[in-house]
Image (tube, rainbow, N blue to C red):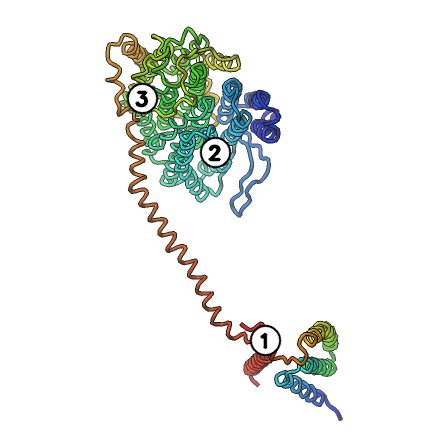
Amino acid sequence: MVTASWYLILAAGLFTIGAVGLLVRRNPLIMFMCVELMLNAVNLTFITFGRELGDIGGQVSVFFVLVVAAAEVVVGLAIVVAINRRRPQATADDLSVLRG
Amino acid sequence: MSTLVDLVWLIPAFPLAGVLILMALGRRLGEPRAGWLATAMMGGSFIATLLVFIGLVGHEGDERETVLTLFEWVPAGKLAVDIGFLADPLSITMALFVTGVGALIHLYSIGYMHGDADFSRFFIYLNLFAFSMLMLVLGDNLLLTFLGWEGVGACSYLLISFWFTDEANASAGKKAFVTNRVGDWGFLVAMFLAFLTFGSLQYGEIFFDVESNGVAAGTASAIVVLLLVGAAGKSAQFPLHIWLPDAMAGPTPVSALIHAATMVTAGVYLLTRMNPIIAEAHGWVPDLIMWVGLGTALMAATIAVAQNDIKKVLAYSTVSQLGFMFVAVGSGAYVAAIFHMVTHAFFKALLFLGAGSVIHGMDGDQDIRRYGGLARLLPITSMTFVAGWLAIAGVPPFSGFWSKDEILAYAYGENKVLWVLLLATAILTAFYMTRLVLMTFFGPPRWISGDAAGDVEAGDAVGTAAPDKAAPPHRHPHESPWTMTIPLVVLAGLAMVAGVFNLPFTSDVHFLGNWLKPSLFGNEGHLPFGGGTQWVLALVAIVGSLGGVSAGAAVYIRRRIDPARIEHPFLARAWRIDEIVTNFMGGPGRRAFERTTQFDEQVVDGAVNATGTLIRRAGSRLRVSQSGLVRSYALGIAIGAVALLAWFISRAGF
C-alpha cells in the first residue's frame, strides 16, 4: 500500500537534491533546473496534502506555482541565453559585477 | 427682504475683477483708460455697499447682522474656516467709507499719475489694496481678516516702493513691511490663542461662546494684548509707528488712501470688532490701550510741529489722530472711535490729496519752507485744504470737532490727567496744522528763484523723501486738473458736514451710535456725567483749538516767537526713536541674530547632517556583505529558511 508518506518522502528527497544542487553547482543552467526541481517537489507536497485532506486548495496552489514557474522560466532562460552569448562558459561565480 | 444684503459678496468682487482685468489688459488699455476702469470698479463697489447698507437699514435693529458663506476655505480637523462675509453695521460703515473715499482717490490718481510710465501697474495695486481692505473689513472670521490684513500690508509695501528705482523708496517699503511683521506676529499668536480657547475663529461663534460660557479674564487679556500688538503695528502706534512717516515715500494718493484714510484704521477696527473680548479682560488692558494711544498721540503731535516736509507733517498728524482713536477704544467709546475714524478718513484724505495737488503744482517739491503764498495760485486746492485744516483743528461746526470732542468727553470721564494731556494734544494739533496752512498758502512766496535757498539745506538732512524731480530754478505753481479737484471738493464738503452723523445733543441724533449698537453688544461705555458738564467740556475744547490756531498765527504770521525755538531738533528728529531702534538692532539685536544663526547652523543643521553621515557610514560597512555571488545568497536564504522552520517547530512544541 502506497501511503501519503511515500509521496512526502519522495518530495523531500527531490527538494533536497534541488537545494544541494543549487548550492554546489556553478553552471547557471543546471542551477536553474535545480530551482525547477525544488518547485516541483513543493507541488507534489501540495497535491499529496490536498488529496489527503480532501481540500481542492492544494491543487489550486499548484496551478499558481506552475504559472509563476512558467513566467520565471521565460525570464530566467532569456537571461541564461544572454549570458552565454556574451560570455560563453561563464559560471555563476564569474557573474559578480554587482558586488558591493 | 434680505436680498439686498446678500449682495455683500459684490463689494470685494468689483475690485478683484479690476485687478484681474488690469493684470491681463492693463498695458494695452494704457493711460488713462486703465485708471478709469479701476475707478469704475471702485464706484461699482461703492454702489454695492450702498445697496447692502439700504438692505441693512430695512432690517430690525437686532437683525442687522447677516453672514453670507461662499464656500469652505480651510477644512482641517477641528479648524473649519469659511470664505464668509459678515454684513453688520460696523463692517458696512467701514466698507462705505473705504469704497467711497477709495473711489474718489482712484479718480484723483488718474490726474496725479498722469504721464507715469507704470500707470496701469499703479491701478492694479490700488484695486488690489481695495480688495484686501474689503476682505479685512467684511471677513466673518479672524483668518479671513488676517488674509486682508496681510494683503493690505503687501499692497502698502508695493505702493510705498512704487518708484523702486530710488533707493530711499525701496528701503521705506522694506521698513514698513518689517515693522508690520512685528505686529502680525501679535495677530497670529492672538489667533492661535483664540482658536485654542474657543475652538473657532468665526466672530459670531467666538462671541456666542464668550456670552454663554464666559472666558477667563487672563485668557481674554492675553488675546487682547496680542491683538493690540497687531493693531499697533498696522495703525502705527508707539513703538511700531516708525514706518508710517517713511511710508510717505509712496505716491501721494497712496498716502491718502492707505496711510491715512483706510489701512491704518484696521487696528482700530479690529479692536472694536473684538469688543466682547475686551469687555472680559482685566481692567488694566483697556487702560493699556488708552495710554498707548495717548502717548502716541502726544508724541506724534510734538513731532509734527517740527517737520518741514508737507507729507511728514500730515503723516505724524495721522499717527496722532490714530492715537485719539485708541484712547477712545481704551475708554470704551467705540462709537467715538469709529466716528473719529470716519471723519478722519474724510479730512485726512482731503489734506493728503490737497498736499498732493500742491506738490503736483510745485513740480514735486515737498518742503513747506519753499512754499508760501500759494492761495492765490491754487484757489480750489487752498479752499478745500482750509476746510480740512478747520476740521482737524477741531473748529466747530466742522466734522473733526464733533468726533474729537466726543473722545475728549469720554477721556474726561475716564481720567482727568488723561483728559488734560489729550486736550494738550488737540491744541498742538491745531497749532501745527495752522503752521502748515500758513506756511503753504499764505505769507510771501518763497519759491521764487534763489529765495530762501540758504536755509533750506539744513533741512534736507532731516527730512527724507527728496523731491523726485530736480528742482527747477523758477517755478510756475498751477492748479490741478479736474480729476484731482473734484475729489477735493467732495471730500471738503464731507469734512465740513460729517459731524451730523453723530450729534451729541439727544440720543435721537446720535445716529452712528444707534446704528452701531448691534455690533457692540452693549459694551459701549457711558458718560458718567450729565449734559451740563458736556457743554463745559465742549467749550473748553473749542477754546483750546482756537487757542492753538491763534498761537500758530502768532508764531508764523506775527513772528512773536522765533519758530526755531519751537521746532527743536529733538522733535525734528522724531524723538530720535529711529536712531534708538537702529542702534539697538545694529548692536545687541544684531548679536542676538548672529547667535541664532550660529545655533541654526551648528545645532539644527548639525543634527540633520549627523543623521546623514551616520547612515552613510553604516552603509559602507554593510556593503561588504553584497559579494555578488549568487550561490552565497542562496545559502543565506537556505539558512534563513531553516532557522525560521526551526523556530516555528520549537514554538509548536511537539
Amino acid type of the residue that numbered disc 3 sits on in the rendered structure: Gly
Q: Nearer the viewer, mark 3 or mark 2?
A: 3
- Name the image quarter holding residue B505: top left
Q: Position of residue B240 (x, y in %)?
A: 36, 32
Q: Are marks 1 and 3 on the same chain?
A: no
Q: Which residue is mark 1?
A: A96
Label 3 secondary element: helix
Of pointers 3 and 2, the one earlier in the residue sequence = 2
The answer to whether residue B6 is visible is: no
Q: Which residue is mark 3?
A: B459
- Name the image quarter holding residue B348: top left
Horizontal side, residue A3 vs residue B394: left or right: right
Q: Position of residue B512 (x, y in %)?
A: 46, 20
Judge whether B282 appears above or below B549 on screen: below
Q: Position of residue B79 (x, y in %)?
A: 51, 44
Q: Which residue is mark 2?
A: B154
